Image (cartoon, grey):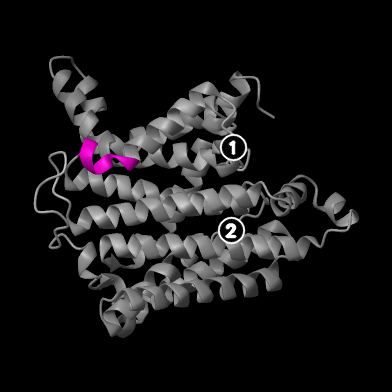
Amino acid sequence: MLKLLLSHDLPRSRTLSLLLITVLIGLALAPFLFPGTRALNTAATICIFIVLVASYDLLLGYTGIVSFAHTMFFGIGAYGVALTLDAWGATWGVVLVGTLIGLVIAVALALVIGLLSLRVQAIFFAMVTLAFASAFLILASQLSGLTGGEDGLSFQIPRVLTPAFKLLDDPLFGVRITGKILDYYLIFFCSAVLFVLMLRMVNSPFGRVLQAIRENEFRAEALGYRTVYYRTMANCLSAGVAALAGVLMALWLKYTGPDTTLSLSIMIDILLMLVIGGMGTMYGAVLGVTLFVLAKNYLQNLMGVAAEALAAVPLLPLIVHPDRWLLWLGVLFILSVYFFPTGIVGKLRKASGSGH
């Protein structure tokens, strides 16, 4: 059953299996194990970014396509549901319509970009996607009457997903089951379903062709595969899943804006998470996102504790001062790339003798 669910793509490493099970249990029981708004927000962010990074892995890790437009598709999904909820009211029907609008626009745009530019060399495709992403970011920032401009757009979501809604009168295991908890589990289960679907996709005959194109495009073409068709399909599927991740982010934050969905810094974060976890593995997205989001949210606090503990030691409190957390995050990234050049998943699989 488990093999079927994972499309026979098992972790192939005991340590990796334990890490993935730990992440799964942590996310599944997050509201009960880590009560508090900040912890719940961190867990929801991890769920959403696992989907977003895994969808980018489908493009970069499995097909070998470098694109800088992934946050644009993420933003289209978020703005699609945000604009419809803001205009037509907070109902489930509007959520569905907004999701479909965002999904269709993202896939159509990915199709146009793919057909126009996937025939050219990789660097030119990357530049084209960067131009599209920049243009969309400027458009969203300047159409303030529609999108809220730089300030973004706040909107209402169905009441059953708000903190005001109480599912049970009494707490369950010490936690009150409010709409916020239901919102979290909606995101958790949607993310799990999307991840399993992507895992199935990359282990299907379609996914094998994508990997063949990544390894040697000319050989795949010589074998009779229309590589442009497969690359365009991968681009559209990746964009569609990214748009759905954007919908989840909008439903969680009840807000969308250029800084939360369209920023180039998010694109850089996606690349870092993918490199840390390991490209072309899917499971790499899980570990890369978890480590990166936890470090981004809690490294500063840990450094504050370390600075206080080392207060009596000369110089060290200055080195580990919480204000330097971005510097240490960069150092951790450099060390992870140096010691895990194939990502954490690649290293663990190699250590267990099952790496490629």
Q: Residue at x 75, y 65 (%)?
A: 229
Residue type, numbered disc 1: Lys
Q: Residues within 10 Å of mark 1 (few under 14, many from 20)?
A: few
Q: Residue at x 62, y 38 (%)?
A: 9
Residue 224 part of the magenta segment: no
Residue type, numbered disc 2: Ser
Q: What stretch of residues is rendered in magenta?
A: 28-34
**Image quadrant assignment for residue 124:** bottom right
Q: Secondary structure at mark 1?
A: helix
Q: Are marks 1 and 2 in contact (CB under 8 Å)?
A: no
Q: Residue at x 52, y 30 (%)?
A: 344
Which residue occupies the extreme top position in the image?
313
Specify whether residue 350 is in view: yes
In the picture, measured across the screen, residue 333 lies left or right of residue 279, that is left
Q: Residues within 10 Å of mark 2 (few under 14, many from 20)?
A: many
Foreground of the two, 8 or 13: 8
Where in the figure is residue 205, as x and y percent of width and height?
74, 51
Q: Secondary structure at mark 2?
A: loop
Where in the figure is residue 62, as x and y percent of width and height?
65, 48
Q: Earlier in the sequence, mark 1 or mark 2?
A: 1
In the picture, measured across the screen, residue 144 lies left or right of residue 207, that is left
Q: Against 271, is 182 above or below? A: below
> Mark 1 sits on what residue?
3
> Mark 2 sits on what residue?
67
